[in-house]
Amino acid sequence: MELLDSFSIGLSVLLGWKPILVIVVGVIVGILAGAMPGLSPSTAVALLVPFSYTMEPALALILLTSIYIASNYGGSITAVLINTPGTPSAAVTAMDGYPLTQKGQAGKALGTALLASTVGGAIGVMILILFAVPLARVALKFSPADYFALALFGLATVASMSRGNVLKSMVAILFGLMIKNIGIDPISGVSRFTFGSDQLYDGFTLIPALIGLFAVSVVFAKMESWTGIPRVLEKVDNKLPSFKEMMKIKMTILRSSVIGTVIGIFPGAGATIAAFISYDVSKRWSKTPEEFGKGSLEGVAAAEGANSSSVGGALVPLLALGIPGSATDAVLLGAFMLHDLVPGPLLFKNNPDIVYGIFSALILANMIMLILGVYGNRLFIKVVSVPEAIMYPLILAIAVIGSFAVSGSMFDVAACIGFGVIGWLFKRYGFPVAPIVLGIVLGKMVEENFRRAVMMDGYSVFYTDKLAFVVLLISFLSFVWPLYKGWKHHQSVNRSKVKSQHN
Amino acid sequence: MQYFSHGTGLSIWALFLAACFIITGLVFRRSSRHNWTGQALLPMALLLLGALFYGVTFDFPVEEAGPALIPRLWIACLSAMCVTILFFIVRGDADKDPKAGRIGFVLLGVGIMVAYYFAILFLGYFVSSVIFLSVMMYVLSCRKPILIISVSVGWLLFSYVVFYKLLYIQLPLGIFENYL
């Protein structure tokens, strides 16, 4: 009954033309941003956050979450048409989507991607509601030690689940945490690492740092590999899969949606891992596994259902605990902060209109995405064909406005450019950028709760508080396990090298 | 150690760390590990940044769970990770530097961005954006003058109407402050 009451409050947020317009704009921007190779969902949301500053908080967050959910579908457009995934998770879609294009069935592939994304997105939101509401209720009883342990768990899983080198991911997280220490200490009020600069008293503003790391660095990275050769996209029709084909893939969509949501809940796992696992599981369950990789509609559905549903899953820890599970969630957390809102259990209690407004808007955004996808694909493809020589300078111009808009300071613009260079260097040498952002975002939560816990109960609290102890133990294992696995793998590679030299 | 936490001591410490960075770069460049120079310099820079920050923490008040505790914890962990990465590089067990792309082109892009920043301070956002967009599109091989002008001027009008008038973002106007 309470849930229904809260939902009616959420639905009331959507009344009127403004929220609908905001969702439509969010879905269009999300699809376009997702479709542009190099622009990830986090980049799109980061670039748009400052412009939501003057909007009502509920509308601003509806806009950003609509972009988030639609960008996962957008990523499939270029993955299917030119074998260039618009988002990292769409790489899995390309495995079957592009072969379908080569067979002249691009429309069918895009239709399947759209259908799976819509159903996956909707299922993800439903599971989000089922999980987040009770979790937020439980989280009201958490102590500072529990919050410290949970935030650390988030960081440890981000490092352990990142693709590539775990050590480099940890370095990126710690760099982010260290950057967050710059400014006035939140507990004692002492100024730290400001080197006499007044502008650093509040530390680096989050949004310019995000824009620099996600958007500006992308442009610099693109410039390094610049060829100037324009993209050529296929012409497509708006064909959805036939009823018979839909029946054939319905179980794949449902299964991958559940897999995607559950994986999305774990910090750091995200859409890409969800898509890979779901693709693998679907291949095992399929009656025609031999078609996977050669243009299977099931393959496209498995990847898209999982990556879109992972959005709902990833929002569970963000909304219920205030712990972002992915880079885009970290950007969303920044958007909440910009509007003086703190995600977590108290948000459900104090601002049910915002939380349930987001839930209702996400469901509506999925429906709007289906309609826009069916009728607007041709237009989206034309927009995506805009030459990069025009797109990248415009991204930089938007980045400058976005950085300036947050607090009207040119220092923030300088910081954005600086973070852009740092992001480019990190990416160039294989250090992921998203963990830096998670470190910056979670740094305050980790420090404040750690010190509060120690001040209240001493260091022993971390083993006397059962939840904190268990979560810390899991965090430790989730960090050490991939290192151990990497070391074992390294040993076996070395042994086989020695063997081949002997032979 | 407190001498190095502020004033002249901190400057000496910073110069010493910068010298360490340059020496590391030179040593790697001339050694058999020259293909790992970039891979080594990034963790080295973070390690030295950590050392600089560590020196500063001695200026913080000493108390239980005080302001120095967490920064020192992160610096210790970061240093341990960076040293491990450097160890793997020295052993030759790490990824080599990526093939050098168009680094000069990136530096040109960064340079144009920095010039754009200073131009905004002097000419304001709108005028400098028109210049920036035109220059950047030209640099990125766009050779259609009409397209360049229409995109730049189109952005000027769009940003003025949407950001300045509708969203009330008080963008810097530079020397044109009194005209708009």
Image: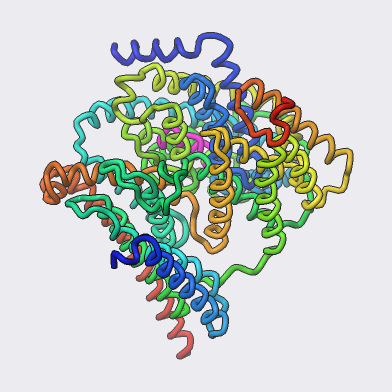
Farthest residue to the front: give it: B8
Residue B158 appears in the figure: yes
Is A491 situated left or right of A77 in this image? left
| Residue at the spot 61% in from the left edge and 47% down from the top edge | A216
**A311 is within the stretch colored magenta:** yes
**Is A143 in front, or is B22?**
B22
Task: Give how far across and how far down residue B116 sits, in percent.
Answer: 69, 46
Task: Give how far across and how far down residue A449 sits, in percent.
Answer: 25, 42
| Residue at the spot 80% in from the left edge and 44% down from the top edge | B134
Is A175 situated left or right of A190 in this image? right
Q: Is residue B116 above or below residue A65?
A: below
Q: Report the label total.
A: 0
Render colour scheme: rainbow
Q: Is residue B156 above or below residue A276?
A: above
Task: Give how far across and how far down residue A414 sits, in percent.
Answer: 57, 47
Task: Give how far across and how far down residue B63 sits, in percent.
Answer: 18, 52
The image quarter in which residue A322 lies: top left
The span shown in magenta is A303-314
Farthest residue to the bottom: give it: A502
The image quarter in which residue B123 lies: top right
What is the magenta segment's predominant secondary structure?
helix
Quadrant where the image shows the N terminus of chain A: top left
| Residue at the spot 64% in from the left edge and 37% down from the top edge | A398
**A38 is within the stretch colored magenta:** no
Q: Is residue B72 above or below residue B156?
A: below
